[in-house]
Amino acid sequence: MRLFVAINFSESFKAHLIKLQSRLKENASAGNFSLPENLHLTIVFLGECSAQQAAFAKSALDGLCFEPFDITVDHVGRFRQKGGDIWWAGVQDAPALSKVRDELAANLTAKGFLIEKRKFAPHITLGRRVMTGVAPYSITPFCETVKAVELMKSERIFGKLTYTGIFTKKHNF
């Protein structure tokens, strides 16, 4: 199974993301846009995992210790790619988020996972292969309080990309 660890959002936070996505769609000649139910912030991508690796990932996630923290989206940006760019909603620097990511990466590494070494750049993907003349831009910030982190499974069900939570780690009290 294809797994990743993510932060999922409330419907009100997603509504803000959908507005950003709609503006992008209006100004794009092409693109593959994320389904509203799939909008999330990936903390660590694990890729294809066996059932045993999934159990190890659950254990690593369960070992996290964190208090609720806020994340704020304040800009829209892109990763340039041939054939269309990946557009995303950018998250402000959040030390608590980085701490959770670093702790999780250490826990997963201890369980035998190979974690990407590149700098963590928290973002929420709005669309892929997007063709538009729009430049990245700042927005009126909006935020969400994170109280849980989830191990997610990615699969195609009847041709539709579906993300399903298989384990949730809630904040410590």
Image: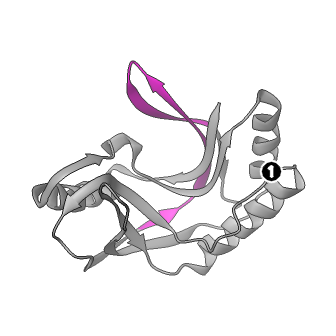
- Looking at this rendering, what residue extends furthest in the front direction? 82
Please state, as top left, top right, bottom left or bottom right, where the N terminus lies in the image.
top right
- Place of residue 126 in the rendered image (x, y in percent of width and height, measured from the top left): 33, 56
Q: Left or right: 122 with respect to 88?
A: right
Please state, as top left, top right, bottom left or bottom right, where the C terminus lies in the image.
bottom right
Q: Say which residue appears at 80% left-offset and 54% top-offset.
A: 108
Given residues 24 and 169, the one toward you in this image is 24
The colour scheme applied to this rendered structure is one colour
- Place of residue 90 in the rendered image (x, y in percent of width and height, measured from the top left): 40, 71
Q: Say which residue appears at 15% left-offset and 57% top-offset.
A: 28
Query: Residue 73 magenta-drawn?
Result: no
Give the SS element for disc 1: loop
Local packing at callout 1 (Cα closer than 10 Å; few below 14, some 14-19, many 20+) is some
Q: Say which residue appears at 67% left-offset and 66% top-offset.
A: 101
Give the vertical position of 14 relative to 1 (above or below).
Answer: below
- Looking at this rendering, what residue extends furthest in the top direction? 158
Main secondary-structure element of the magenta-colored stretch: strand
Give the magenta-colored segment's residue range: 144-166
Give the vertical position of 10 relative to 165 (above or below).
Answer: below
- Place of residue 81 in the rendered image (x, y in percent of width and height, measured from the top left): 38, 62
Q: Left or right: 40 with respect to 16?
A: right
Q: Residue 37's image quarter?
A: top left
Q: Left or right: 139 with respect to 170?
A: left
- Place of residue 105 in the rendered image (x, y in percent of width and height, measured from the top left): 75, 61
Please, what is the three-letter code of the amino acid marked with disc 1?
A: Phe
**How many numbered marks have been drawn onto this rendered protein structure?**
1
Give the vertical position of 14 relative to 99 (above or below).
Answer: above
* Residue that badge 1 annotates: 113
Q: Say which residue appears at 39% left-offset and 50% top-offset.
A: 39
Query: Residue 148 magenta-drawn?
Result: yes
